[in-house]
Amino acid sequence: MKLIVGLGNPGEKYEKTRHNMGFLAIDKFFKQFSQSEVNWENNSKFKSEIVHLEWQKQHQKSKEKWTPEDNLEKIILVRPQTYMNNSGLSVKLVSDFYKIKGEDIWILQDDIDLPTGTLKIRFGGASAGHRGIDSIISSLGTDKFWRFRMGVGHPMRKELSIGKVRNVENYVLEGFDRGEMGKARELVKRTTKAIEEALEKGLQSAMNRFNSK
């Protein structure tokens, strides 16, 4: 079983902001690969919107007695409704209830330390100041989970040359500039494909194929 969590802030005003790249990516994955009769459930117990899916791998395992069930992966998709800074509460509630280990938890997050449009998948490590990741590490008591880091650029690097630097907290709650919108859309698509690759062939294959150079 895999727990895939898209980080973001609930509410229409945050919908297309940099901080909501995790929500955008998990929504895209859900729309493309879910069963049509399944929909998001607002679950107060888990303080999340949640949906259960089943992923049928196309590649058969190499063993004599193979059945389709051998390649069936159960997936839980989660959009925490606690706001970004308390994302760990939702992740902890869901992972504890379903007894999901850290290596089976995949977090989709925005990352200001990566250029807009780039993707890096990695396991473990510090939060680099990301409040949602801070909360998850604190709640789980470990940093040993997977992150799909979606680059949204850093305001200092983008604007220092013109003598204007926006506050980082305000920056991530803004929408993308007109020149970045195409890159942001492509990044959501790329992340969705990386999730599919990871489910089908494993995370190492996804990193080899989709991690930006």
Image (spheres, rainbow, N blue to C red):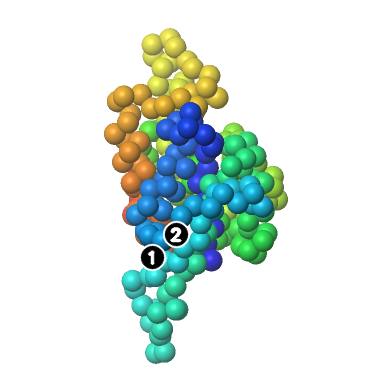
Q: Which residue is found at the position 66% from the left and 52% from the top? A: 45
Residue 169, compared with residue 129, is above or below; it is above
Q: Residues within 10 Å of mark 2 (few under 14, many from 20)?
A: few
Q: Secondary structure at mark 2?
A: loop
Foreground mark, 2 or 1? 2
Which label sits on residue 181?
Answer: none
Front-lying residue, 27 or 109:
27
Q: Is residue 142 visible?
A: no
Q: CA distance from mark 2 to mark 1?
A: 21 Å
Disc count in the image? 2
Where is residue 7 shown, x and y percent of the image?
A: 53, 42
Q: Residues within 10 Å of mark 1 (few under 14, many from 20)?
A: some
Using residue 41 as the reference point, say whether residue 55 is left or right of it.
left
Where is residue 6 shown, x and y percent of the image?
A: 50, 46
Using residue 96 as the reference point, say whether residue 78 is left or right of it.
left
Q: Which residue is found at the position 42% from the left and 37% from the top? A: 151
Q: Is residue 141 visible?
A: yes
Dot 2 or dot 1: first in sequence order is 2
Please, which residue is most extreme toward the front here?
A: 37
Q: Which residue is found at the position 48% from the left and 23% from the top? A: 171
Residue placed under numbered mark 2 in the picture: 38
Residue 15 figure quarter = top left
Mark 2: amino acid: Val
Q: Secondary structure at mark 1?
A: helix
Front-lying residue, 182 or 164:
182
Which label sits on residue 200?
Answer: 1
Where is residue 185 shown, x and y percent of the image?
A: 33, 38
Where is residue 105 shown, x and y percent of the image?
A: 55, 56
